[in-house]
Image (cartoon, helix red, strand yellow):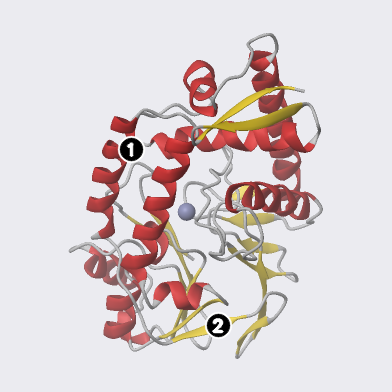
Amino acid sequence: MTLEIPTPFAVGPVNLFLIDDDPLTLVDTGPNQATALADIASALAKVGRSLNEVGRIVVTHQHLDHAGLVGPLAAVSGAEVCAIAGLDAWLSDGPGGNLGDERFALEVLGGHGAPERLGILNEGARRGLEGFASSHAEVRALVDGGDLDFAGGALRVHHRPGHSPFDTILEDPEAGVLIAGDAIFAKHPAPILPSPPGVGMPADDPACSGLFAAARRTLTWLAASDAEVALVGHGEPVGDPGRVARERLREGEQRAERVLAELTGAGATTAWELTRRLHLRWSLRQPFHALCPTLECLDLLREGGVVFEEEHDGVRWFACA
Ligand SMILES: [Zn+2]
């Protein structure tokens, strides 16, 4: 069952999922804010459960709205915490990982021509957000393709990076249900938010480009799924996630065509300038969120050999091949 928990973030409330089996399992935690434990306790009370009955917490990925409360929630409930291998280390240093992500986002913005003052804005916003993190030292690492066992059965664990390097999807094949975190949404594409090189992805994978390619692999995997529904971190469940994933792949190609049309005849252009012109997902308050869809398109076009990239004085420029 779904527990909708408020967050202070632009994304709105986050969905946690309670799996009523033995152990009683909570998927994701919500952010670390003063009201969070009370919010979860009252959501549990509505379904006749209490915090100290929660025996296991599974975290789908590292973002603050999903993992922020992991430390306090584990301490109060006494629950075991599980996360995909790699995310266990991140959770033991929650605020540090978030700061690393932020530094990397600033580097990427600067390297793609965003004005410095936007970086400062972003930094200010994210320094505030770090307060919504927490850490938990003892995390059991889950393995891609392994099982999460319950008295009444098991869920299959899939590491499917894309939205973030750690995205984990839990699958109940018999019921045709996926618990998909932020890997897919009913009404809009899932943002792809790269972390520094080596975080959650092979160290030799280029951080941004590696995650964009991983996101396409994850959508392709979802597109082949015959699951009936995906329960997701924000908003309504996604019915027929295979169909929705196929749509998202098509939309990704259409966005790339818009970027290519904008580049054609324009000469060398930075990704930030393209972002400003195209407004694929425009937000001055979240400049990294605004830039990433453009980078994703450029990555697809470069892979297809129609766009090339050059670096001058630390800034990358793109042009038609
Ligand atoms: Zn997320």
* Element type where label 2 sits in the image: strand
Q: Residue at x 37, y 84 (%)?
A: 137
What amino acid is labelled 1 in the image?
Gly
What amino acid is labelled 2 in the image?
Ala
Which residue lies under the disc numbered 2?
Answer: 141
- Foreground residue among 300 and 166: 300
Q: Residue at x 65, y 16 (%)?
A: 263
Vertical placement of 186 versus 166: above or below? above
Location of the C terminus by quadrant is: top right
Say which quarter of the image contains residue 69: bottom left
Q: Residue at x 70, y 54 (%)?
A: 218
Vertical placement of 8 versus 313: above or below? below
List x then y, in percent, for residue 175. 71, 68
Q: Left of 181 or right of it: where is 110?
A: left
List x then y, in percent, for residue 303. 77, 38
Which residue lies under the disc numbered 1?
Answer: 119
Q: CA distance from mark 1 to mark 2?
A: 34 Å
Instruction: Note whether residue 50 is visible.
Output: no
List x then y, in percent, for residue 183. 59, 53
Q: Residue at x 65, y 22 (%)?
A: 259
Q: Left of 30 or right of it: where is 202?
A: right
- Foreground residue among 292 and 68: 292
Mark 2 neighbour class, 10 Å CA radius: few under 14, some 14 to 19, many 20 or more: some
* Element type where label 1 sits in the image: helix
Vertical placement of 142 versus 306: above or below? below
Q: Residue furthest left?
A: 34
Sooner in the amino-acid sequence: mark 1 or mark 2: 1
